[in-house]
Amino acid sequence: MTGMTTPAALPADIEAIIFDCDGTLADTFGAHFRAFRDILADYQVVFEAEFYHARLGLSRYQLLEELKQAQGKPFDEQAVAEHNTAAFLTHLPAIRPIPYTQDILRSHYGRLKLGVASGGQRPIVEATLKTIGVRDMLDTIATIEDSGVGKPAPDLYLLAAKRLEIAPRFALAYEDSDEGIEAAERAGMRVIDIRPFYRTDPARW
C-alpha cells in the first residue's frame, strides 16, 4: 500500500496529524451497532455485527444503501438516518478511547496541528470526541455535513488540511479502513493504518 509510514517516529516535515474518528480515535462500534440495530428492528430488518464490521469505512447513507441491497427489504433510509443520531447518543457509555491513537494525539498536542476528518455526522463526532476527552485538543473537525461526500473521496481530508492551513503533503493521516486510507492517499497525504495495532471485536456485541 502506498503512502505508508511506520508509527515509530513521524517524518521531520510533518506539520499536522489528521485522524479519522470512528475506529481510529474512538472505538464506537458498540454504540453505532446498537443504534442501527434498534432503529432497523422497527422495519423488521436484521442488522448483524459482522455485516457492519465489514463496512466500517462507509458513510451512514452508503451503509444503509448496501444493507438494503443485501437484504432486499424496503425501509426508509432517510428516516433511519434522521433517527440514528438520537439513538447513538443514548449509547455513549459504550464508546471507548483507542490507546494507540490517544497516545499519539496527546504526545503531539501543542506541537503539531491536530484535526479530524470523519465521514460521520457532526453531532455524533462531536459527542464521541467529548466522550473520550479529546475534543478541546483538536484544531479542526471536518464531517460529512461539511463536504457532502464521504470516503474514499479525498474531500474531507482536503478540507481539513485547508482549515489547518497546510499543504496535504505535510499532513499525516491515521485511518482504520480501506476507504479512509484511499481518501487520505488521494488527498496527497501519508497515512498510517492502525489496524495492526487495534481492531474492535464485533463478537462482543
Image: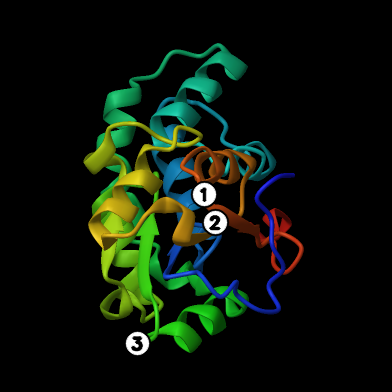
For disc 2, the marked residue is 29
115 or 199, which lies in front? 115
Q: Position of residue 116 (x, y in %)?
A: 37, 60
Q: Amino acid at mark 3?
A: Gly
Instruction: Tell me which label, 3 or 2, sits earlier in the chain.
Output: 2
Asked if residue 25 can be seen in this view, the reply is yes
Which of the 4 quarters of the picture holds residue 141? bottom left
176 or 13, which lies in front? 13
Viewed as shown, does residue 122 lie left or right of 38? left
Q: Position of residue 4 (x, y in %)?
A: 69, 55
Residue at horizontal 39 percent and vertical 19 percent from the top: 75
CA–CA distance in space, label 1 to label 2: 6 Å
CA–CA distance in space, label 3 to label 2: 29 Å
Foreground label between 3 and 2: 3
Tag on residue 22? none
Residue at horizontal 50 percent and vertical 68 percent from the top: 25
Sort mark 2 into few (<14), some (14-19) or many (20+) by Cα contacts within 10 Å.
many
Secondary-structure class at tag 2: helix
Q: Amino acid at mark 1?
A: Phe
193 or 191, which lies in front? 191
Q: Are marks 1 and 2 in contact (CB under 8 Å)?
A: yes
Secondary-structure class at tag 1: helix
